[in-house]
Image (cartoon, rainbow, N blue to C red):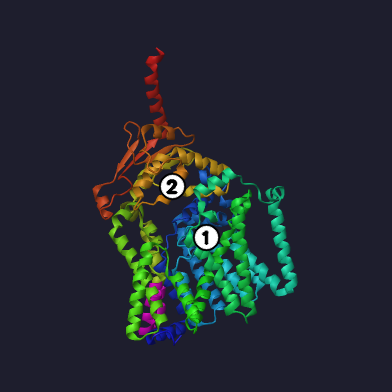
Amino acid sequence: MPSVLPAWLSSAADGIRNLADRPWTLFLLLLALNAIARPCSSTAHDARLYSLQALNQAEHGAYADDVFLRYGSQDQFTMFSHLVGPIVAAIGLRPTFFVLYLVFNTLFIFALFRLIRTLVDDALIATVALIFLVTAPLSYGGGDIFTVHEQFFTPRINGMTFTLLALERILRGGFATALGLLLVGALMHPLMAFGGMLIWAGCVASTYLPRGVFVALLCAALVGVVTILGIPALGARVFGTMDDDWHEMIRVAVGYNYPDTWNLKDWLNLGVSFALPIAGCLSLYRDDAPRQRFFWMVTLAGAAGFVATIAASVLPYALLFQGQPYRVLWILKVLQAPVGFLLIARWSQSSSVAAKIAALALLAFFCMTHYLVIELMMFAIAAPISLFVSRMRQEACWYGAARGLALGAIGWMGYRWVFFAIQREHIARYFDLNEWVLFDLVSPILLLVVLCIAIHRWPNSRAQRWASATVALSVPVILFAAEIAPSYRHAHSRLGAETAFVADQVRADGKRPSVYCSFGRSDLLWIDARTTSYFSIIQTAGVMFNRRTAEELQRRAEVVAKFEMARQRQETLTPDPSKEAALSALFKVDFHCPEPARDDLIRLCREPGLDYVVIPHEFPGLYSAKYVTPASEVASLHGSKHGPDNRVFVYECQKVRTVAELAFSARTAPRER
């Protein structure tokens, strides 16, 4: 791109091409950049739910009474816990999840490496796309809930890894090998492999069948699906039923599964996901039949998944909705970067003003992350300044605008760093180190710029490979060591000492005790305290898989509503009306409801099967144990409180019930006489 890039950036482009000729060095660099931009926390986010499934399998059903598992969960659709459970039993949960994350994350990046280099012939574009893919969050669907490249261990990364390997085989015509890889991926996570199955079937059929026959089969399949969905008795027999009440419970708990809840950013992401492969078919690969066929099948698979999701959200069919067909979109998200960067390179060199503007718009899409007003202001400030500098230096106008977008992305990252530095004490009250790593504080654009500068200045450094390998291994190992170290967990994590205290207090003979803890970390109950969890918001993900689970979680949410709302109010950093409305819908109380009272605790302790309640609220005469964080430990957390209220009270439900009954008897006895 000599007509667009200045001399130093052209030199960096040559350096990146040379790097692409050293695949092992490039691969290790990708691992290192991934470790920096997206550091792992093996048991964060959804890994907490999968940790429960693995523990339950490792301990032969010891956690089966937990509300998430009691009536059935996604565990019944995958081999994950059956394969991982024995490893957990042998070496422990956290080491297992960490090692498996390292292994499969490496394989995932290897699969990306093979696919993108097969898909894109231009070494520069392929390498830049790979760097972006391993450093960007790559969200798909609604609400930024799911990202392609997750920083924690779930079977999703396994399913995606084998699917990516299969897609590379499909591009090379190895359909038999691709099918085997897809079957392995489906065993680990069928939802993530299903899109690959559709693409495989489409590519095989369009390769070996005449076009007319292929189109006829496609139409016949469409008619068959519409017939099944259009005849309620037949659809119910195939997919099972999901009535409106169940749909409403799901919508309240995990509404991101309904496209009508997606915001403007989600729809923009979806539109670009479809537009780019279509543009690739019509522009980039008109004379390349295998790749054009591949992209048409990717587009059709994505469209089928999205349309099926819309249908599932309004039709009374359980399995169709539980299959979350929109998960196919992760494949289109992966292909955004390579196809998008190819189009940016082509359009930026076009003589057409419209093409140059389209290239800038596409570049802006890759530079922006949150679409907040403050973020947009960063771009509004950076772009004119960069254009003015380009005019003074007589640089290409397009380059000046592109540089402004890059500076805007870096400026937004800098703003977030400053914000987190200023608010670090408040954030430390409610997020541990292993949760901080999920905040995406390193911009892929910054890493691309730094890499260009480094390659321009040191194009032939022999230390690149060893430095990359060291960073790729040391960063996750250091973070994991800090996460599991007993001294660190006790003194420097916000609930480490409290969890240890609770683990010493809760006991039950012959079964895992059931505990309600209002701190919102049911994973600490499962992993460290070795108990089941009565209720936490993360467990509401189970409402999709069984109606009885949905009904029970809804009932329990109303019982613990005031305790949960008290925690949510304390953890709120800035007002968020949409979040407050969602919480009010879930718990059936106003976000600003009164603090929990003694009667609320007594009602909770009367719940069948509940053994202990752990809350920061003090009700004299009822609690069995109390923990107050020592001042030295408070100071060790940068001056912040050690938890939501710096205190923990453990209430034994049997004791609370007995005291309440005695008090009731004392009040009613005079009336009886």
Taking the image as drawn, is residue 113 in sight?
Answer: no
**Left or right: residue 539 compared with residue 600:** right
Residue under numbered circle 2: 581
Mark 1 or mark 2: which comes first in sequence? Answer: 1
Kind of residue indicated by mark 2: Ala
In the rendered image, residue 545, in percent from the top left (x then y), is placed at 57, 49
Q: Nearer the viewer, mark 1 or mark 2?
A: 2
Which amino acid type corresponds to the residue marked 1 in the rendered image? Gly
Question: Where is residue 164, by image quadrant?
Answer: bottom right
Identify residue for label 1.
Answer: 141
Secondary structure beneath disc 1?
A: loop
Q: Is residue 381 above or below residue 517?
A: below
The stretch drawn in magenta includes residue 468: yes
Q: Quadrant of residue 115?
A: bottom right
Cβ atoms under marks 1 and 2 closer than 8 Å: no
Q: Position of residue 462 (x, y in %)?
A: 39, 83
Q: Circle 2: is it few (<14), some (14-19), or many (20+) Cα within 10 Å?
A: few
Q: Which of 226 and 198 lies nearest the eye of the viewer?
A: 226
Give the magenta range: 445-469
Q: Quadrant of the C terminus?
A: top left
Residue at 49%, 61% in the rendered image? 266
Q: Secondary structure at mark 2?
A: helix
